Image (tube, rainbow, N blue to C red):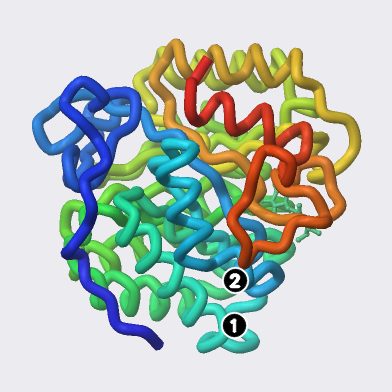
């Protein structure tokens, strides 16, 4: 494990950029008020970021220069570190090492960072609840009160997992994090692959600084899920799009850029923060880098897939 602190960051934002590209060195600790994410001065912010693929599958993408370039060239202010829980439980130290490196590099380059307990095939977060508690206790004690870190406690509950299961799980995990980082922002996954916000809005968790995950893949999910987002927002539920993809729900297939434009306008119009899946060179539509890209090298636009080029533009120029 590598040592890290929350100090020594390089400032990359100016006052006028506060809303557009919030930076931990300028905007500091975030908090949740109503549907909004606010900075340390109470100003509304919107984070625009990128999600790694599974940390242990594409470990070469967790490197300091790569994170630096995303931060400086793309004005990326948020990185999500996707740590598959099923992989973690088999070999905790392998996953932890990459998680800690990722956190350190995000801090070095003045980005917010989501620590993602990436449940997927293990459809119910209660399956590995003890390991999750141990993991979040460890990370939050290693980086107590770190303003960069946002916790995401269960990527996508699915199968027969109910909101009640997630509610009970959250009542175990949230206090574990808060015992070290009392004011941290925590994103909670929602039933049916983080799509069922409306059920949650009937019985939200009784803690401060909680946001609820909505995940979408633009070529599969369209108006029906957009209506869910709008309704949840209207009901006052704080939503964070902690994962979305410019592909079908498989991560592959057709990239519907028209649908993507509708989705991202909705996010921009409502100030809803997001990260886009995925920072890898895998041969799949949602990957931002082409298969020939070598992640130890600096990248140019020529190393990006069509999806990568599109995503760079929304991160940098948010139009
Ligand atoms: C996908 C990856 C793919 C991998 C698969 C299984 O893109 O390469 O083989 O997982 O691990 C999600 C999940 C995310 C999925 C993604 C695309 O959070 O792990 O990644 N997706 O299927 N939810 C909806 C879509």
Q: In screen coordinates, is 306 left or right of 112?
A: right
Q: Is mark 1 on a helix, strand or loop?
A: helix
Give the crowd class for mark 1: few <14, some 14-19, many >=20 residues within 10 Å: some
Please report the residue visible at 42 percent of the width from the left and 15 percent of the height from the top. Answer: 270
Q: Can residue 160 be seen in this view?
A: yes
Whether label 2 touches label 1, CB < 8 Å: yes
**Residue 9 versus residue 29 in the image, above or below:** below
Please report the residue visible at 53 percent of the width from the left and 58 percent of the height from the top. Answer: 66
Q: In screen coordinates, is 225 left or right of 101?
A: right
Residue in front for this viewpoint, 182 or 163: 182
Q: Which residue lies furthest to the left in this view?
A: 41
Asked where in the image residue 206 lies, by quadrant, the reply is top left
Give the crowd class for mark 2: few <14, some 14-19, many >=20 residues within 10 Å: many
Disc 2/disc 1 C-alpha distance (Å): 6 Å
Q: In screen coordinates, is 84 left or right of 117?
A: right
Badge number at residue 89: 1
Q: Can residue 208 be seen in this view?
A: no
Residue in front for this viewpoint, 94 or 63: 63
Badge number at residue 185: none
Give the x, y percent position of residue 236: 35, 20
Residue in front for this viewpoint, 201 or 177: 177
Asked where in the image residue 229 lies, by quadrant, the reply is top right
Please report the residue visible at 41 percent of the width from the left and 13 percent of the height from the top. Answer: 234
**Residue 1 versus residue 37 in the image, above or below:** below
Q: In screen coordinates, is 175 left or right of 281?
A: left
Q: What element carries label 2?
A: helix
- The tally of labels here is 2
Give the x, y percent position of residue 149: 31, 56
The residue under label 2 is 85
Residue in front for this viewpoint, 130 or 138: 138
Please report the residue visible at 23 percent of the width from the left and 27 percent of the height from the top. Answer: 18
């Amino acid at each position: 494990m590598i040592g890290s602190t929350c100090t020594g960051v390089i400032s990359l934002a100016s006052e006028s950029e506060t809303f557009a590209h919030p930076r931990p060195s300028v905007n500091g600790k975030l908090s949740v008020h109503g549907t909004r994410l606010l900075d340390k001065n109470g100003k509304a912010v919107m984070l625009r970021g990128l999600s790694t693929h599974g940390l242990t599958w594409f470990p070469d993408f967790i490197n300091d220069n790569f994170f630096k370039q995303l931060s400086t060239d793309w004005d990326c202010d948020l990185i999500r570190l996707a740590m598959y829980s099923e992989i973690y439980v088999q070999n905790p130290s392998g996953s932890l090492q990459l998680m800690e490196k990722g956190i350190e590099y995000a801090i070095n380059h003045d980005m917010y960072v989501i620590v993602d307990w990436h449940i997927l095939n293990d459809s119910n977060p209660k399956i590995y609840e003890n390991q999750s508690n141990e993991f979040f206790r460890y990370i939050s004690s290693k980086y107590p009160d770190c303003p960069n870190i946002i916790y995401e406690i269960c990527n996508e509950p699915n199968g027969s997992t109910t909101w009640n299961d997630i509610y009970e799980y959250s009542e175990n995990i949230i206090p574990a994090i808060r015992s070290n980082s009392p004011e941290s922002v925590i994103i909670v996954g929602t039933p049916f692959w983080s799509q069922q916000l409306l059920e949650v809005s009937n019985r939200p968790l009784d803690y401060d600084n909680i946001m609820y995950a909505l995940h979408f893949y633009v070529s599969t999910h369209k108006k029906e899920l957009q209506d869910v987002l709008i309704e949840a927002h209207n009901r006052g539920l704080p939503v964070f799009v902690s994962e979305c993809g410019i592909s079908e729900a498989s991560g592959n297939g057709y990239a519907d850029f028209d649908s993507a434009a509708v989705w991202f306008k909705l996010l921009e119009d409502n100030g809803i923060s997001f990260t886009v899946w995925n920072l890898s060179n895998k041969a799949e539509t949602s990957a931002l880098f082409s298969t020939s890209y070598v992640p130890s090298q600096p990248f140019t636009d020529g190393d990006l897939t069509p999806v990568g080029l599109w995503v760079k533009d929304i991160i940098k120029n948010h139009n």
